[in-house]
Image (tube, rainbow, N blue to C red):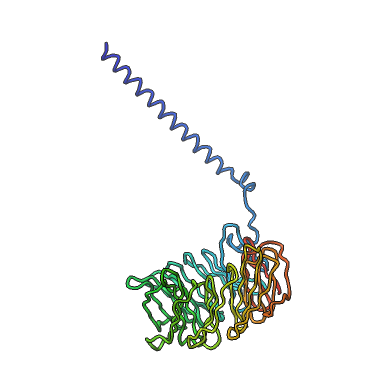
């Protein structure tokens, strides 16, 4: 009797499992039928959910006229190449004419790409990757594949490049290439290089490094000639962390640190130091002078500092009513961008012109008499 009961229970369990399996199978079939029905009838209901991408080229950027419209999912970087605008997305490199026509579109496979421009050349390289290329206005000048990941790269005149890479033997390595992409200089470095500034004729460069002295972060500058293994001069223990650097005068150098400005002559002599009066917002330099913007949080004010003659030690300061976020030193004017306005100043610290903005822009590029304002969803061109 007990054996009969056990067999009966086992049979009931098998029947229950078969029933559950049948129910699952029927449920799966029902789902398949629903999905197929939706697919077959998609023409009746899909239009209600389509997004209007009219004007977008392959869902990225418009062409034909300004403002350019940027698709919501597209991230981009921009720079100027002569009178043209270069826009780099994660997958393509666009070249636009002044009228907004697409002069050239190229696909690329660079990940985490950095875009720079100088003297009618552009440099594109992979941050922590191994690829880089240099382009002129007419065509690609050369492309290279490095053996080690790239930390940073700099562009000189005629398309010379300085590439700082990871190294197994040194803290980093410096490779310098000429306008044909041939290596003309190599240096294994014991400090972390943050920037390289070429001489005007690209016969040498100044190497800016981050170092440590008595527990403090300091800057170091080493000037070299590509035809020699000896250093031309070295300036060490500069009491600031390097942010950016620019050429100055005859083979000299301007250094913007996080706490101080410093200027050096072509022989390495320090001409001027300028401790910052507030927190540095942005800085830029041209042949006309060096400009810096500072924020004083205690006084809730923004200051523009202008240095046109470092040898005299003079600084022109202007108090700004807006909270600006970018500054650009141009040949004859200084341009500053805030959330609501683009303003131009003279190197005497006096305001010249203001352009009211109808939306916030993250950055801007200058080319001739035009500025290109970079927004989240648009790039606008204004004559300014």
In this picture, residue 60 sits left or right of residue 149: right
Using the rendered image of the protein, determine whether residue 157 is visible from the camera's viewpoint. no
Residue in the picture at 61% in, 76% down? 291
Give the percent coordinates (x, y) of residue 257.
52, 73
Q: Which quarter of the figure has residue 7?
A: top left
- In the displayed structure, 373 sits above or below 348; it is above
How many labels were placed on the picture? 0
Give the percent coordinates (x, y) of residue 294.
61, 69
- Foreground: 377 or 109? 377
Using the rendered image of the protein, determine whether residue 168 is visible from the camera's viewpoint. yes
Q: Which quarter of the figure has residue 39?
A: top right
- Foreground: 71 or 150? 150
Residue in the picture at 38% in, 79% down? 187
- In the displayed structure, 315 sits above or below 89; it is below
Q: Residue extending furthest top?
A: 1
Residue in the picture at 44% in, 72% down? 210
Q: Locate the C terminus by quadrant.
A: bottom right
Give the percent coordinates (x, y) of residue 324.
65, 67
């Amino acid at each position: 009797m007990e054996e009969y009961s056990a067999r009966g229970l086992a049979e009931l369990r098998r029947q229950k499992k078969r029933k559950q399996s049948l129910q699952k199978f029927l449920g799966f079939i029902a789902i398949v039928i629903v999905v197929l029905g939706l697919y077959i009838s998609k023409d009746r209901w899909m239009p209600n959910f389509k997004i209007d991408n009219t004007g977008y080229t392959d869902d990225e950027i418009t062409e034909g006229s300004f403002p350019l419209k940027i698709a919501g999912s597209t991230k981009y970087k921009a720079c100027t190449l002569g009178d043209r605008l270069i826009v780099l997305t994660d997958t393509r490199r666009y070249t636009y004419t002044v009228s907004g026509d697409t002069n050239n579109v190229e696909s690329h496979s660079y990940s985490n790409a950095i875009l720079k421009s100088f003297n009618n050349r552009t440099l594109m390289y992979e941050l922590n990757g191994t690829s880089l290329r240099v382009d002129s206005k007419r065509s690609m000048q050369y492309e290279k594949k490095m053996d080690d990941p790239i930390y940073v790269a700099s562009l000189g005149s005629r398309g010379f490049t300085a590439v700082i890479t990871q190294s197994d033997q040194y803290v980093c390595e410096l490779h310098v290439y000429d306008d044909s992409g041939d290596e003309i200089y190599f240096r294994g470095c014991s400090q972390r290089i943050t920037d390289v500034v070429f001489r005007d004729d690209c016969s040498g460069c100044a190497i800016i490094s981050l170092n440590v002295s008595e527990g403090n972060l300091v800057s170091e500058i080493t000037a070299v000639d590509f035809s020699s293994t000896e250093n031309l001069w070295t300036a060490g223990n500069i009491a600031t962390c390097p942010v950016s650097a620019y050429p100055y005068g005859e083979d000299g150098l301007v250094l913007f640190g996080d706490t101080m400005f410093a200027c050096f002559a072509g022989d390495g002599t320090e001409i001027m130091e300028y401790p910052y009066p507030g927190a540095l917002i942005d800085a830029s330099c041209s042949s006309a002078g060096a400009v810096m913007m500072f924020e004083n949080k205690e006084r809730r004010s923004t200051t523009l500092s202008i240095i046109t003659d470092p040898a005299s030690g003079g600084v022109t300061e202007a108090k700004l009513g807006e909270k600006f976020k970018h500054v650009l030193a141009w040949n004859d004017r200084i341009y500053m961008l805030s959330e609501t306005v683009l303003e131009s100043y003279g190197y005497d610290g006096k305001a010249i012109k203001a352009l009211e903005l109808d939306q916030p822009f993250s950055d801007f590029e200058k080319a001739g008499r035009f500025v290109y304002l970079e927004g989240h969803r648009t790039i606008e061109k204004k004559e300014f």
